[in-house]
Structure formats: structure tokens, C-alpha cells
């Protein structure tokens, strides 16, 4: 995903009311930006740290841009716009970079499925049984090259795991893919200290046939790209 124009640099000041973030631009002016992230952004809200944002010329937007990348408390770059994750995975899929998901003729996005009023992020289709792919954006760093999900209690995430389990029982393929928009990471683990129920649900889903993948991103002001597979430690 290439940013055109490249993102603008600023200094992160604060996030509030979940969807608002204040930044200071290079010329000293301050902007209030949209923050497209429903999580806690734990370790990603560091006053005075470098950040990067995109501007929008859309006439109906109330805010001038969107917070895209921040610097975490341990100095990593994190892509905090969760709306980017699905596009990053779709781009990598189209380029054939995700080896475990190759071989499907087509895919659709945001397809209704399951019994709990869910939409799957990607539905891959071809000669083999269909593959249901749920994508989770990861920005929580635990240090030492380890990232974790979730960064807050997520009942919605647990619901998706139940839906994926049911898909496997019906004979289809189910994949949970962690899109790690965090620099310098080697592995992903469940954040048991924050949401032990999700960690238990994730392990149960894996035991019942849900595939759990993680892919790391290269994160810069010019582009974010899904680059390499990471270890998943359950």
C-alpha cells in the first residue's frame, strides 16, 4: 500500500473520545485527526512521539485527515488505522505473497456468514472447499520482538472464533490471520493478561481446525506492505 502523497510527519499529542487524535505539525500548528481504531491502542499513545498522518480533500469530512502511524513506547512504528489491514492482506493475496492462501481463483470481501450475524473479511473460492479468512490488526508490542492480540477485551473477536469453528465443522477451511502493523516483530501471542477468555477461545479454535497465521508489515511514511510470515505462539 503506497501512500500517494506520502504521509505527513507530526508529533502525537493525545487521543480522546476514541476516534479523535490531536497532533502538532512541523510548522507548529495543531490538527485534530480521525483515529480509525476501536481498540485501546495500548503502548501506542505516547505524547511527544513522532507520528504520521494522511490528509483528505473530501468536502464532507469534518476532520482534515487520519492518524496512520505512531511511535510506540518502545520505539517501534505501528500502523493504527485498522481499516488498512484488510486492504494490506488483499494486496498481498493478489501478489501471491501469502503462500498458505494461494490456489484460489477468486475472493470476495465482507461476505455474510455464520449464525451470529457476522461478515467474513475474505471468502476465497475455487475448486477446493471455500476458505473463510478473518483478519485482525495487531499493534500491541510486548517487547523483545513479540506482538500480542488483543489490546483490550474483545467479545467480537471471540464471536468470530466461534463462527470459524463452525465453518470447519461444516467442511470448509477457516483462517484467522493476524496483520501485524508493527515494525521489528518476530512472533505473535495471545494477550492473556488483557483478555484471558480470548486466549482460551483462540487455543480452542486452533485445536478444532482453525488455522492461525501471522504476517508482519514493513511500516514507513511512504508505504505499508505485508512482508513476511511470523511465528504464532499459542
Image: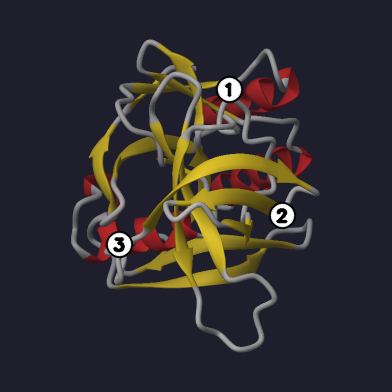
Q: Note whether 77 is above or below 7 in the view shown.
A: above
Q: Earlier in the sequence, mark 1 or mark 3?
A: 3
107 above or below 229?
Answer: below
**Residue lying furthest front:** 28
Q: Identify residue for label 1.
A: 203
Task: Name the residue at 75% across, 31% down.
Answer: 153
Cα separation between marks 2 and 3 = 23 Å
Of the two numbered discs 1 and 2 on the same chain, state the one appearing first in sequence: 2
Q: Is residue 4 above or below residue 43?
A: below
Give the distance between the C-alpha atoms of the residues marked 1 and 3, in whole angstroms: 31 Å
Q: CA distance from mark 1 to mark 2?
A: 31 Å
Indicate which disc residue 1 carries.
Answer: 3
Q: Secondary structure at mark 3?
A: loop
Q: Badge 3: few (under 14), some or many (20 or more) residues near its Cα, within 10 Å?
A: some
Q: Residue at 69% of width from left, 35% of height from top?
A: 40
Crowd around label 1: few <14 · some 14–19 · many ≥20 (10 Å) = some
Q: What residue is shown with label 2? A: 19
Residue drawn at x 70%, y 76% as measured from the top left: 62
> Which residue occupies the foreground of this view, 183 or 92?
183
52 or 123: nearer the viewer: 52
- Using the image, determine if residue 67 lies above or below residue 54: above
Between 108 and 21, the residue placed more toward the observer is 21
| Mark 2 crowd level (few <14, some 14–19, many ≥20, 10 Å Cα) | some
x and y percent of residue 180 in the render?
Answer: 41, 38
Amino acid at each position: 500500500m503506497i501512500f500517494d502523497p506520502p504521509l505527513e510527519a507530526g508529533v502525537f499529542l493525545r487521543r480522546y473520545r476514541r476516534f479523535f487524535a490531536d497532533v502538532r505539525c512541523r510548522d507548529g500548528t495543531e490538527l485534530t485527526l480521525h483515529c480509525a481504531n476501536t481498540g485501546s491502542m495500548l503502548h501506542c499513545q505516547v505524547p511527544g512521539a513522532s507520528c504520521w498522518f494522511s490528509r483528505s480533500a473530501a468536502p464532507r469530512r469534518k476532520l482534515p485527515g487520519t492518524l496512520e502511524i505512531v511511535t510506540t513506547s518502545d520505539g517501534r512504528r505501528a500502523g493504527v488505522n485498522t481499516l488498512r489491514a484488510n486492504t494490506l492482506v488483499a494486496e498481498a493475496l493478489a501478489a501471491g505473497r501469502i503462500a498458505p492462501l494461494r490456489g484460489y481463483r477468486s475472493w470476495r470481501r465482507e461476505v455474510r456468514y455464520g449464525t451470529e450475524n457476522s461478515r467474513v473479511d475474505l471468502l476465497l473460492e475455487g475448486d477446493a472447499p471455500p476458505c473463510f479468512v478473518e483478519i485482525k490488526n495487531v499493534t500491541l508490542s510486548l517487547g523483545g520482538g513479540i506482538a500480542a492480540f488483543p489490546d483490550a477485551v474483545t467479545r467480537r473477536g471471540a464471536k468470530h472464533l466461534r463462527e470459524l469453528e463452525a465453518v470447519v465443522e461444516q467442511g470448509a477451511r477457516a483462517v484467522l490471520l493476524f496483520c501485524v502493523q508493527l515494525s521489528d516483530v518476530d512472533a505473535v501471542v495471545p494477550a492473556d493478561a488483557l483478555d484471558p477468555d480470548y486466549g482460551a477461545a483462540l487455543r480452542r479454535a486452533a485445536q478444532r481446525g482453525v488455522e492461525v497465521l501471522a504476517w508482519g508489515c514493513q511500516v514507513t511514511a511512504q508505504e505499508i506492505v505485508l512482508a513476511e510470515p511470523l511465528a504464532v505462539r499459542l
